[in-house]
């Protein structure tokens, strides 16, 4: 998921700021209002157009935006009984691990998931986009002999140059290193940490790490990296800004984000209505028009823009793609993060 950017709330006709970012508990919803918390950047800007503005206009329920998403802050709110967030963008494994404790069960009498892929839905989380961890390469450098797999991503002799990836255990580096090392995609879990880090060690000196999606996009636009373990949304925006890159739709690891409702919010009913709106075909089509994340509703219209479509998971993988195991990550996020941090610190 896009990395969190510094707190900044935008005034909109349909979005009312009730309290500033920074100290305190953040924006507070009043009756008939919802606080929506996103990850910022281009993704939240797209959600604003797809979810926030239309929902506020059609329902009469005001929407207050906040950012960034921090699970520690959500935990503090719930533990203290002072919950001021109502709908939060989250990782699927967070929804699974904290269902009933820090996030509410989804009210399926309000939120219609009948047409949503059941593999993406959990008791406490509803998907609001689909995407993939994707290999992207510099066409000016490798245009005549492009990489074709994650194995090529790790082959610095045949494909010399800088590689880029997010500096976070949950951002795909562990899985793609194992795929590159020959592990079948249906045998990736539980993660073999020693094997994954041994493979990552082979390109350690050629790796550039990013801490934000903006850094990832800038690196693609400026040619700082020759291959990237990329977020499609950022890659497509880089292309629109002139980046000379192309995707490799072989062995993509599919992921998705979910919307959750913090446990104990006073705006639970309104929050469920917001989520119900967010997964409608119209809302999903608008989201995809603004950023290259695929709609979760099968009836959503796909964008006409060819660059955006090029980065949506629309079957180009020809069956080589695989789903991230969110249940495994729900149980192992802390351990994986500790091991990744130790590796980075060596």
Image: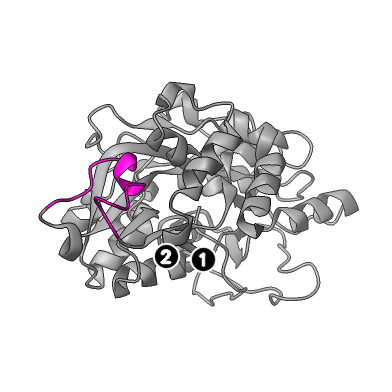
The local secondary structure at tag 2 comes to helix
The disc placed on residue 221 is none
Question: Is residue 123 rendered to the left or right of residue 241?
Answer: right
Name which quarter of the figure residue 144 lies in: bottom left
Q: Which of 215/100 is in front?
A: 215
Give x and y (percent) for residue 256. Answer: 47, 41
Question: Is residue 105 rendered to the left or right of residue 159?
Answer: right
Give x and y (percent) for residue 57. Answer: 47, 61
Give x and y (percent) for residue 12. Answer: 50, 74
Mark pair 1, 2: CA separation: 7 Å
Do residues under tags 1 and 2 come within 8 Å of each other at their CB atoms?
yes
The disc placed on residue 212 is 1
Is residue 276 visible from the viewing direction of this image? Answer: no
Name which quarter of the figure residue 273 lies in: top right
Q: Is residue 101 above or below residue 49?
A: above
Q: Which residue is identified by label 2?
A: 216
Residue 146 lies in magenta, yes or no?
A: yes
Residue at 32%, 47% in the rendered image = 155
Residue at 61%, 29% in the rendered image = 328
Query: Would you call the spot at circle 1 few (<14 residues within 10 Å), some (14-19), or many (20 or more)?
Result: some
Magenta part of the chain: 145-160
Give x and y (percent) for residue 287. Answer: 37, 54
């Amino acid at each position: 998921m896009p990395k969190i950017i510094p707190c900044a709330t935008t005034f909109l006709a349909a979005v009312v700021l009730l309290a500033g970012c920074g100290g305190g508990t953040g924006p507070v919803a009043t009756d008939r209002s919802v606080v929506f918390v996103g990850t910022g950047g281009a993704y939240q800007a797209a959600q604003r157009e797809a979810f926030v503005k239309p929902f506020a206009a059609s329902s009469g329920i005001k929407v207050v935006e906040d950012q960034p998403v921090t699970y520690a802050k959500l935990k503090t709110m719930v533990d203290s009984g002072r919950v001021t967030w109502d709908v939060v963008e989250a990782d699927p494994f967070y929804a699974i691990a904290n269902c009933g404790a820090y996030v509410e069960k989804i009210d399926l009498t309000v939120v219609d998931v009948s047409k949503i892929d059941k593999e993406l839905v959990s008791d406490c989380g509803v998907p609001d986009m689909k995407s993939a961890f994707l290999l992207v390469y510099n066409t000016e450098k490798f245009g005549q002999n492009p990489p074709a797999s994650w194995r090529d991503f790790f082959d610095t002799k045949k494909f010399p140059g800088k590689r880029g990836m997010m500096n976070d255990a949950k951002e795909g580096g562990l899985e793609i290193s194992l795929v590159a090392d020959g592990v079948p995609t249906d045998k990736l879990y539980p993660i073999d940490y020693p094997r994954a880090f041994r493979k990552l060690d082979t390109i350690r000196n050629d790796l550039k790490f990013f801490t934000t999606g903006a850094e990832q996009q800038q690196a693609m636009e400026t040619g700082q990296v020759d291959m990237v373990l990329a977020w499609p949304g950022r890659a497509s925006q880089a292309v629109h800004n002139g980046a000379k890159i192309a995707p490799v739709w072989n062995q993509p690891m599919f992921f998705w984000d979910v919307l959750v409702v913090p446990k104990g919010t006073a705006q639970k009913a309104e929050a469920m209505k917001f989520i119900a709106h967010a997964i409608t075909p119209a809302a999903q089509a608008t989201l995809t028009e603004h950023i290259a994340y695929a709609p979760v509703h099968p009836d959503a219209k796909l964008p006409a823009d060819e660059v955006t479509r090029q980065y949506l998971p629309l079957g180009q993988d020809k069956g080589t793609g695989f789903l991230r195991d969110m249940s495994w990550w729900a149980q192992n996020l802390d351990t994986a993060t500790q091991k990744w941090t130790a590796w980075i610190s060596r």
